[in-house]
């Protein structure tokens, strides 16, 4: 009888499934996204205005495909919540002594694998504001703003 599933096993399975779904749909996804004119979101513009000039910005989760054009916005939405909690702790260590973290997550209560619409097969972790606030604070981050946008 196999032993209990460890969280990294679950994370690996979810991430690999999501990557496979994106790879399978990559051409369709990029052709649809490529037709749109790229604009910085108002939230990104506000964040960038807070930062000093000439600062280096790590873009976590960015794929090599189309890297020059797209930020890795919303890349943590595909990770299981426990992996995100660990990631936020690790990022605080890496960003010391000063760091600013902006993250986009899916709002809601039920994490799941998308079965239709968008890119089927992708995992989406959904967070409530309270849950996300606690996760940031436990990881050691000071929360400046948490907002829900649609």
Image (cartoon, rainbow, N blue to C red):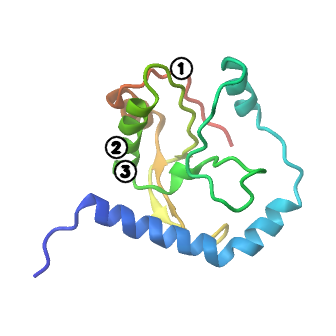
Task: Check whether the beta carbons of the residues at disc 3 and disc 1 lie within 8 A of each other.
Answer: no
Q: Residue at x 56, y 46 (%)?
A: 60
Q: What percent of the width, then of the height, locates residue 70?
A: 73, 50
The residue to which callout 3 is attached is: 83
Label 1: element kind: loop
Please determine whether, in this image, residue 54 is positioned above or below residue 7.
above
Is 95 displayed left or right of 62 in the figure? left
Task: Check whether the beta carbons of the residues at disc 2 and disc 3 lie within 8 A of each other.
Answer: yes
The residue to which callout 2 is attached is: 86
Rendering quarter of residue 80: bottom left
Q: What percent of the width, then of the height, locates residue 19?
A: 54, 69
One can see residue 65 in this view: yes
Location of the C terminus by quadrant is top right
Disc assigned to residue 144: 1
Q: Earlier in the sequence, mark 2 or mark 1?
A: 2
Q: What percent of the width, then of the height, locates residue 62?
A: 62, 52
């Amino acid at each position: 009888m196999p032993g209990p599933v460890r969280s990294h096993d679950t994370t690996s399975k979810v991430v690999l499934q999501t990557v496979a779904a994106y790879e399978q749909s990559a051409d369709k996804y990029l052709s649809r996204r490529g037709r749109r004119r790229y604009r910085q979101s108002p939230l990104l513009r506000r964040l960038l205005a807070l930062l000093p000039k000439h600062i280096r910005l790590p873009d976590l989760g960015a794929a090599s495909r189309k890297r020059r054009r797209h930020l890795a916005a919303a890349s943590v939405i595909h990770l299981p919540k426990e992996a995100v909690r660990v990631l936020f702790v690790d990022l605080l260590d890496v960003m010391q002594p000063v760091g600013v973290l902006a993250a986009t997550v899916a709002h809601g209560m039920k994490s799941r694998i998308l079965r239709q619409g968008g890119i089927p097969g992708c995992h989406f972790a959904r967070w409530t504001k309270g849950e996300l606030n606690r996760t940031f604070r436990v990881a050691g981050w000071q929360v400046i703003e948490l907002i829900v946008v649609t």
